[in-house]
């Protein structure tokens, strides 16, 4: 399953949601995930000063007709997988102030925007058993920005 996200300043959030219908996000997404994000070259060496590696832990929980996401025990973010823009709270200095998530077949697309203009998209794919997720972030011009891999903890 694939996803797309757009928040360069919140790269760890980068791999978020796939959907089953316009109202309900895919059940594979629910739970706690742990992983790492690397620069576009895939470098994972922490001794490389050019590597922009981030480790993260994120939890997705059903909340009403949507999903609540918490990254690294921070403030929860609410969203629905319906293709509508939702605000990203406390993102005034971020590269995105809204995001939307939609499904196209087995692909979930996360799009981040600042003042209505797309700033980043993220495509994520679930493994067949739903225990791993691999993602790629791209700028609006198609340039690859980073990659992330995560494993489901529960």
Image (cartoon, grey):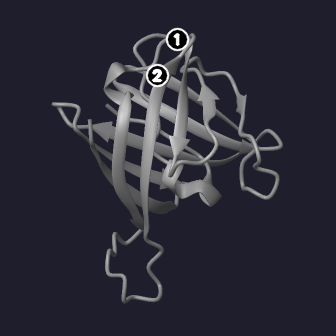
Q: Position of residue 57 (x, y in %)?
A: 42, 50
- Label ID, residue 66: none
**Rendered position, 134 above or below 111:** below
Q: Position of residue 16 (x, y in %)?
A: 47, 38
Q: Is residue 93 visible?
A: yes
Q: Is residue 109 left or right of residue 133?
A: right
Disc 1 is placed on an element classified as loop
Residue closer to the observer: 53 or 63: 63
Q: Position of residue 30 (x, y in %)?
A: 38, 27
Q: Callout 1 environment at 10 Å: few (<14), some (14 to 19), or many (20+)? A: some
**Rendered position, 68 above or below 63:** below
Q: Residue at x 40, y 67 (%)?
A: 38
Q: Which residue is mark 2?
A: 103
**Rendered position, 114 above or below 78:** below
Q: Position of residue 129 (x, y in %)?
A: 16, 31
Mark before the other along the chain sequence, 1 or 2: 1
Residue closer to the observer: 131 or 71: 71
Q: Residue at x 34, y 55 (%)?
A: 35
Query: Is disc 1 in contact with disc 2, using a CB cutoff of under 8 Å?
Result: yes
Q: Is residue 22 left or right of residue 104?
A: right
Disc 2 is placed on an element classified as strand
- Label ID, residue 22: 1
Can you name the residue that lies furthest to the front here?
Answer: 73
In this figure, what is the number of numbered marks? 2
Which image quarter is the N terminus in?
Answer: top left
Q: Callout 2 environment at 10 Å: few (<14), some (14 to 19), or many (20+)? A: many
CA separation in Å, label 1 and label 2: 7 Å
Q: Is residue 116 left or right of residue 144?
A: right
Residue closer to the observer: 139 or 148: 148
């Amino acid at each position: 399953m694939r996803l797309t996200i757009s928040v360069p300043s919140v790269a760890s959030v980068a791999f978020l949601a796939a959907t089953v219908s316009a109202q309900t996000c895919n059940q594979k997404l629910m739970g706690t995930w742990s992983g790492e994000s690397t620069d576009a070259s895939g470098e994972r060496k922490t001794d490389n000063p050019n590597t922009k590696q981030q480790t993260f832990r994120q939890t997705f929980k059903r909340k009403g007709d949507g999903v609540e996401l918490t990254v690294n025990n921070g403030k929860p973010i609410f969203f629905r997988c319906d293709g509508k823009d939702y605000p990203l709270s406390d993102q005034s200095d971020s590269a995105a102030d809204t995001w939307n998530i939609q499904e196209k077949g087995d692909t979930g697309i996360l799009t981040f925007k600042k003042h209505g203009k797309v700033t980043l998209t993220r495509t994520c794919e679930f493994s067949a058993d739903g225990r791993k997720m691999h993602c790629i972030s791209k700028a609006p011009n198609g340039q690859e920005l980073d990659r992330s891999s995560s494993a489901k903890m529960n």
